[in-house]
Amino acid sequence: MTDSIDDSKKTVINNPGLSDPKPDENHPVVNTLRELIDLVSGRNLGDDETPQEDARLAEALPFPFLGLVGQKEMKLALILSLINPFIGGVLLIGPRGTGKTTAVRSLLDLLPDVERSACFYGCMPDDIEMGGMDAVCPDCAKKYGEGKSLTRTDRVRLSELPLNARLEDVIGGIDERAVAHERFRLKHGILAQADQNILFVDEVNLLADEIVDAILDASAQGLYTVRRGPLSATYKARFTLIGSMNPEEGNLRPQIMDRFGLRIFVRGLIDENQRLEAYRRVRAYQQSPHRVINQFATETSLVREEIQTARRMLKQVQIPDKVAQFGIQLIKNLEIDSLRAELTLFESARAYTVADNRYQVELSDVKLVAPMSLRMRRSAFMSVYSIERNEEEQNLDKHINLSSDLR
């Protein structure tokens, strides 16, 4: 095991997008985002178990992402989904107590910035570029003409969809406060609030069918429409979907399974030292969340900056034709029908490449992300169904040809 973390041992990442590092013997330099996560996650917390005095006020204090022990594939998948939203989100599958929910909530301090509309109607510069001035409201058209910004910088948020949510909570409905003042208007639902954010659904396999249908509709189009009597409104819902489930409690509908880009099997830790270290970290966190969070604060800030830089540089990453052909052939050999397989595979490879401080995807990148991108994409039902249909087609052709010979 590596040395314990204390304030004198901080990590510096050597990235051209950040300020030049100044390493010394107590400040190790790593070259990529992956190396930083692996280095920090592998450290011990130390033996100081003295609890700090807490203020007894309720506040969001998620367990630090870099404090998670092991589970490299799960952590990599979550980081890649932050770098590249086009991956299509992540599904974490595994038994209870393996850290699935903790891992997702620990992303809170790593969430990058995003440009949001500063307009009530959600007008964006892209709307004008695609549809002209008529595609935005008059105020935004005027601001655009004057060279003023239509957006504001905001932090990506983590929105949770609770299991007991009603359909009205999810898609929105009549604003009861407005009705009390004899006014009628619609209020935003959870899906609208998740626009350009992360939507986390814990125990996604236990959601009611009507909720699943609403998520499917919104994720497929990036928007959805709510109609309540004479009122109607269309909301943007471009979110990264992250879900978790315990397969012991039921299967997930194929329609929503297909909406998850990366699929991760989260198993319990095997290594005895890792299990012991995980116990020590959880115990230390329960005694004093602030102390544990502070021990990873510097590196957490570095990782967040790296994710932000990677998001900016992602558009420069290219996939050579030879590498792309390998991915296409792999999907063909696996007999996967859904075109989302290519989307997830290649977008994951691009995100992994930029996280490794490179701008050209290599064959090894595709091979590394292939398992999490392509597993659970073949349908046993559709395989049998396809065989039956082929046999039927052959039988039809046979009898059609026999009928032709009789003439």
Image (tube, rainbow, N blue to C red):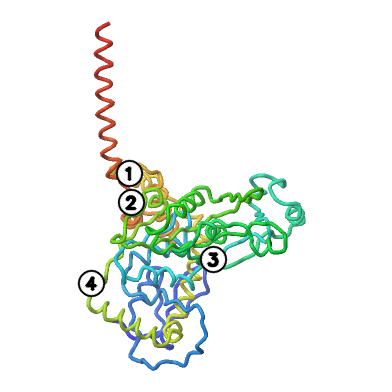
**Looking at the image, is mark 1 or mark 2 earlier in the sequence?**
1
**Looking at the image, is mark 3 or mark 2 earlier in the sequence?**
3
Residue 323: image location, x then y, percent: 36, 48
Residue 62: image location, x then y, percent: 45, 76
Which element type, helix, strand or loop, lies under badge 3?
loop
Q: Decide if residue 196 is in sight here.
A: no
Disc 3 versus disc 2: distance between alpha carbons? 27 Å
Which element type, helix, strand or loop, lies under badge 1?
loop
Instruction: Return the residue at label 4.
Output: 270
Residue displayed at 26% across by 77% down: 275
Instruction: Return the residue at label 3.
Output: 156
Along the viewing direction, whichever of 107 and 342 lies nearer the viewer: 107
| Disc 1 and disc 2 in contact, CB within 8 angstroms | yes
Disc 1 versus disc 4: distance between alpha carbons? 32 Å
Tag 4: amino acid: Ile
**Looking at the image, is mark 3 or mark 4 earlier in the sequence?**
3
Task: Give the total number of marks visible in the rendering.
Answer: 4
Tag 2: amino acid: Leu
Residue displayed at 38% across by 77% down: 67
Instruction: Return the residue at label 1.
Output: 336
The residue carrying pointer 3 sits among few (fewer than 14), some (14 to 19) or many (20 or more) residues within 10 Å by Cα, namely many
Q: Which mark is residue 244?
A: none
Along the viewing direction, whichever of 172 and 357 lies nearer the viewer: 172
Which element type, helix, strand or loop, lies under badge 4?
loop
Residue 27: image location, x then y, percent: 42, 82
Tag 3: amino acid: Val
Q: Looking at the figure, which quarter contains the C terminus?
A: top left
Instruction: Return the residue at label 2.
Output: 374
